[in-house]
Image (cartoon, rainbow, N blue to C red):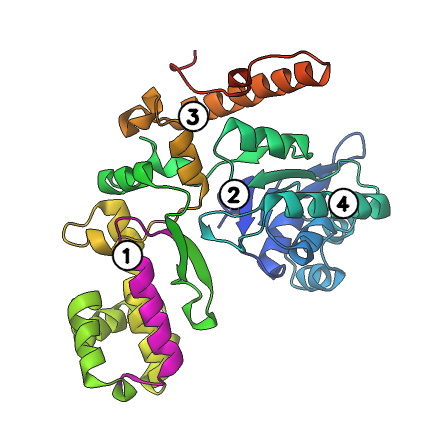
């Protein structure tokens, strides 16, 4: 689909291994220009939190997959040869303790490790254009941005704080909850897309019971093989307090959805009560994020809001400024404030290193008014 519509830049997130499709996307955009240099039309930004995954994107595409693509007539021999001379990604975003899917990695440990890995692989393959390494997760103040840049990050990416901005697709109620969050107002909860695998994501716990209720669903799934095994009183609590519908009603909705989108899974669930349980629980886990975005009335207590501790750090930084009001929060303006603050703090630190003594309050930067 990306190739059909000539989408030239994509972000690859939550990858554990390289798929045939992403290798196809990368290789299909390769050619030689008039100077006989490799021209890369299809750019990939990989978001990773593990060295082993970063390695796959720092290295060229696997020969085995390239050979299969050539045999299928999807790419040419030339493109396969060129793909073995370039990395799979142009940029790698090192994801630390972020909202949503995260390994909760500390940035000060993860970034140096990936930078060292990049340099090691660069020495081996001698790419004409080394892979740029940026950071995400935990970036919400001038101090955190400066720390990342001083450690060698080529760029920074913000996530959680953008959700409280006017441009975000989140509801007004969700924006207010995010603007009130402290650094400790987050916790891990089961993820809808990888529920059966036990994968968790980081969400806001302030003002919502979603993480606790999601954990309850995960507990029931681990302890029982079917709804028939769950005690009647637990079923009653499940239907009245969490799902707010009967299991039969939810299964009817789920069946209708799967009959159109994934008939094979529906067929498997008919003979697998454990899978059926997972699909019904995923109904709640999936819709809860939609309720948060649309502002579903009566479901506020079930809102699933992806959020990392950076949100609380940001709120503390802007507490006494115009950005404390969510109606003043705009993505570009916040980015300007963070980067301006980082530049200011960098200059102050340079002056201190040169021996200049100054009051400690000069070592703080707070947004006073909109820049520009």
What's the magenta region?
Answer: 203-227
| Residue 369 image-quadrant placement | top left
Q: Is residue 225 left or right of residue 346?
A: left
Upstream in sequence: badge 4 or badge 1: 4
Q: Secondary structure at mark 2?
A: loop
The tag on residue 334 is 3
Determine the residue positioned at 38% across, 33% down.
315
Instruction: Indicate whether 238 appears above or below 36.
Output: below
Upstream in sequence: badge 1 or badge 2: 2
The tag on residue 288 is 1
Upstream in sequence: badge 2 or badge 3: 2
Determine the residue positioned at 44% across, 48% down.
99
Mark 2 packing: few (<14 Cα in 10 Å), some, or many (20+)? many
Foreground tag (1 vs 3): 3
Q: Is residue 329 left or right of residue 90?
A: left
Q: Position of residue 193 (x, y in %)?
A: 41, 63
Judge by depth and name the residue closer to the eye, 318 or 84: 318
Let me know if residue 118 is in the magenta part.
no
> Residue at label 4?
116
> Residue at label 2?
137
Q: Secondary structure at mark 4?
A: helix
Inter-mark Cα distance, 4 to 1: 40 Å
Let me know if residue 226 is in the magenta part.
yes
Inter-mark Cα distance, 1 to 2: 23 Å
Inter-mark Cα distance, 1 to 3: 28 Å
Q: Position of residue 177 (x, y in %)?
A: 28, 42
């Amino acid at each position: 689909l990306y190739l059909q519509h000539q989408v030239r830049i994509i972000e690859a997130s939550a990858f554990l291994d390289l798929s045939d499709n992403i290798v196809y996307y990368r290789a299909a955009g390769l050619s030689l220009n008039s100077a006989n240099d490799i021209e890369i039309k299809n750019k990939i930004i990989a978001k990773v939190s593990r060295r082993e995954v970063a390695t796959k994107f720092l290295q060229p595409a696997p020969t085995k997959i390239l050979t299969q693509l050539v045999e299928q007539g999807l790419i040419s021999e030339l493109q396969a040869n060129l793909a073995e001379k370039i990395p799979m990604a142009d940029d790698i975003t090192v994801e630390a303790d972020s909202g949503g899917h995260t390994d909760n990695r500390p940035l000060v440990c993860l970034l140096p490790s990936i930078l060292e890995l990049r340099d090691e692989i660069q020495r081996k393959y001698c790419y004409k254009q080394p892979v740029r390494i940026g950071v995400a997760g935990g970036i919400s103040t001038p101090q955190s941005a400066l720390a990342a840049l001083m450690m060698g990050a080529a760029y920074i990416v913000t996530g959680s704080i953008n959700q409280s901005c006017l441009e975000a697709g989140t509801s007004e109620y969700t924006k207010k909850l995010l603007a009130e969050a402290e650094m400790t107002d987050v916790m891990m909860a089961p993820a809808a897309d990888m529920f059966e695998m036990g994968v968790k994501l980081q969400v806001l716990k302030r003002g919502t019971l979603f993480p606790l209720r999601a954990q309850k669903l995960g507990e029931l799934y681990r302890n029982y093989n079917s709804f028939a095994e769950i005690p009647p009183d637990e079923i009653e609590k499940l239907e009245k307090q969490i799902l707010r519908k009967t299991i039969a009603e939810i299964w009817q909705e789920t069946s209708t959805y799967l009959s159109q989108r994934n008939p094979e899974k529906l067929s498997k669930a008919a003979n697998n009560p454990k899978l059926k349980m997972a699909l019904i629980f995923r109904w709640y886990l999936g819709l809860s994020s939609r309720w948060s975005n649309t502002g579903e009335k009566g479901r506020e207590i079930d809102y699933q809001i992806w959020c990392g501790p950076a949100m609380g750090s940001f709120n503390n930084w802007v507490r006494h400024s115009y950005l404390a009001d969510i109606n003043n929060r705009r993505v570009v303006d916040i980015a300007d404030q963070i980067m301006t603050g980082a530049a200011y703090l960098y200059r102050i630190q340079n002056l201190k290193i040169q021996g200049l003594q100054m009051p400690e309050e000069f070592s703080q930067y707070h947004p006073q008014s909109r820049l520009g």
